[in-house]
Amino acid sequence: MSETTVTVTQSNFQSEVVQSKTPVLLDFWAQWCAPCRAVAPVLDELAVKYKGKFTVGKVNVDEHPDLAVQFEVLNIPTLVFLKGGQEVDRVVGVQPKSQLEAKIQKLTG
């Protein structure tokens, strides 16, 4: 995890996600999940590139299963795109950087 991503928990969900002034990508992941570790550097890159326009939040499903249940996350990695605290898009599994970037541009454009 880098300083450009935000660790999202049940206690900071309201301030970091719902009240965020920028669109948010929530990355539901776990330490033991190899595909999650594969997508993490891509998300870090995108967080740096879109800093100030877009927020990447990381939700560890082992530490915060309540958020995983709230978003009906059945498989990880699951990436949920939110704008104004509302889900607008979602992808499950490892996706190409270009596809994730296109979704971010659509939300920030």
Image (spheres, rainbow, N blue to C red):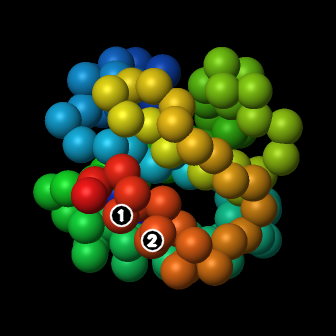
Asked if labels 1 and 2 touch by Cβ distance under 8 angstroms, the answer is yes
Q: Residue at x 66, y 19 (%)?
A: 70
Give the farthest residue toward the right: 74
Instruction: Pick the residue in front: 40 or 62.
Output: 40
Kind of residue at disc 1 = Gln
Does residue 101 appear to the left or right of 93 in the view shown? left
Residue 58 in the image, given as x and y percentages of width and height? 49, 49
Toward which corner of the image does residue 37 lie, by quadrant?
A: bottom right
- Residue 89, can we see it? yes
Reply above or below: 73 against 41.
Answer: above
Q: Is residue 60 above or below residue 46?
A: above
Q: Is residue 92 above or below residue 10?
A: below
Kind of residue sitting beneath label 2: Glu
**Secondary element at tag 1:** helix
What is the quadrant of the N terminus in the image? bottom left
Instruction: Work out which quarter of the rendered image holds the C terminus and state it.
Output: bottom left
Q: Which residue is mark 2?
A: 101
User: Where does label 1 land, which residue?
Assistant: 105
Closest to the observer, 1 or 19: 19
Is residue 86 or residue 76 the one in the foreground?
86
Q: Total marks drawn?
A: 2
Residue 105, given in percent of the width and then of the height, sits at: 35, 64
Between the residue at mark 2 and the residue at mark 1, the CA separation in whole angstroms equals 6 Å
Disc marking residue 69 = none
Give neighbour class at mark 1: few <14, some 14-19, many 20+ (Cα, 10 Å): few
* Residue 12 can be seen in this image: no
